Image (cartoon, grey):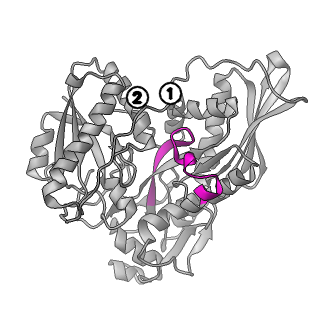
Amino acid sequence: MFSYLQRTGFMPLVVRGIMAGICCFSMTAKGLEPFTRLSGSGADANLFNMAGSNTIGAELGPELVKAYLQAKQVQQIKVEETGLNEVKVTGSVPSLKRNVSIAISAHGSSDGFRQLEAGSVQIGAASRPIKDSEVRKLGGDSIRSADHEFILALDGIAVIVNDSSPLKQLQVKQVADVFSGRILQWTQLGWGVDPIKLLARDPQSGTWDTFNNLVLNGRGELATSAERLESNDELSRNVANNPNAIGFVSLNTIGGAKALAIADGGDHYIKPSAASVATEDYPLSRRLYMYSLSDDAFVKEFLAYTQSPEGQAVVEKAGFISQKVARLPQTDLSTMPKEYQGMVKGHQRLSVNFRFVAGKADLDNKAVRDLKRLVNFYAQQGGNKKLLLIGFADADVRASKQSLLAKLRAKVVSRKLIKAGMSHNTFKTKGYGVLELASGQSLAGKTKNRRVEVWIEK
């Protein structure tokens, strides 16, 4: 299930200070207050609008909005289609004798950021991180802060083929060769004689942006022969109906197609699964986001709800991977280095990995919120088992400093957990060195490799 590629390299790294403070948003949704006031006049009060990723907007966004309104004791909730990939969620607030509504459009992550900039929506849904160009248009780096960037769920981009295909696995480079048109026929992959039918998401899609960044980046452009589709579900159906087709979709929309196991430079292939995506070990795993600069109380309350256990339960129900901390199934570690096997002996892997802002020792926004999630999980376990924090270094750091950097990363997490309320006797910290999950040639790969794993005593 988990695979690593060992590398070595030489490059000094300047390690910066430790991020102070924990995100101010509560992750407890129980007891949401019912509506006691609504602005404006008329029968229908629009609470806020959301636009962006089809991956989020097709089902997850509306389901989260419905659950939020239910928690606010709204009645007669319904979802109405108002256009192609557009819906309106409405409900009744009997005590105020008014209706509330939230409009959701799902025309791609880029469209969400454009509408945020235009002020036509209060929340932008994205299946990729915000780009530098979009940050500049939205007023600067503050939108990347934990107050404005919310990791909604984890997902994997599945490379899919027809269920009748004998193909089982591909290297990321091979996937790039297929989608850039360097591999044109199935015979070049070991079977069949027919031409490959390429299906890809549309240019506005965050799924496309993520695929382009993780797969094609530096390896070529998408072949002009590729058919572009706006919907994950539509693409999956087309692959399921065409034995010569190959495409890529969100993990929860594989449908009747078959997902391939993927490796990024090593010999260990990982299929997209709940466990491999939860830890973000799967080479094509990704995060789903919501961004907002709004000061509106309902917008803030809804975003906080998405981070709560109740909100994350909706994430799971919609077929995505939630951020709740859990014990993972036992994994065969026989192919792992002996030193690593020795470190984790007598422990069980947890579903959370802590990662860092690129080039810094600061925890990223997901990790900041995961601190509280881990504290809550540990309390539920009874608090009598020690945690093991294992840090990993970058391959391009001077070999003599790799172990030190790895240990430092584990120490960063331990200090943050202490600030979040855990005792320093709760965990052990170790630094392994370099065990790469992805090729460190790209920023995305480096970010994936800069991590701290969490294990718990059996």
The image quadrant that residue 102 belongs to is: top right
Total labels drawn: 2
Residue at point 85%, 32% (across, down): 44
- The residue beneath circle 2 is 372
Q: What residue type is labelled 2?
A: Lys
Would you place residue 422 above or below residue 232 in this image? Answer: above
Residue 156 magenta-drawn? yes
Q: What residue type is labelled 1?
A: Met
Q: Is residue 227 left or right of residue 261?
A: right
In space, the residues marked 1 and 2 are separated at their CA atoms by 8 Å
Q: Classify mark 1: helix, strand or loop.
A: loop
Q: Is residue 229 left or right of residue 190?
A: right
- Give the farthest residue toward the right: 42
| Residue 196: % across, % down | 47, 78
Closer to the camera in the image, 363 or 371: 363
Q: Classify mark 2: helix, strand or loop.
A: helix
- The residue beneath circle 1 is 27
Closer to the camera in the image, 156 or 436: 436
Q: Is residue 401 left or right of residue 301?
A: left
| Residue 361: % across, % down | 33, 46
Residue 255 magenta-drawn? no
What's the mark number on residue 386?
A: none
Callouts 1 and 2 close, C-beta under 8 Å: yes
Q: In which quarter of the image is the C terminus?
A: top left
Would you place residue 213 above or below residue 389 in this image? Answer: below
Number of other residues with Cα within 10 Å of mark 2, as a class: few under 14, some 14 to 19, many 20 or more: many
| Residue 129: % across, % down | 51, 54
| Residue 74: % across, % down | 72, 23
Closer to the camera in the image, 214 or 15: 15
The image quadrant that residue 270 belongs to is: bottom left
Q: In this view, does 256 lie to the left or right of 60?
A: left
Q: What stretch is highlighted in magenta?
A: 134-158
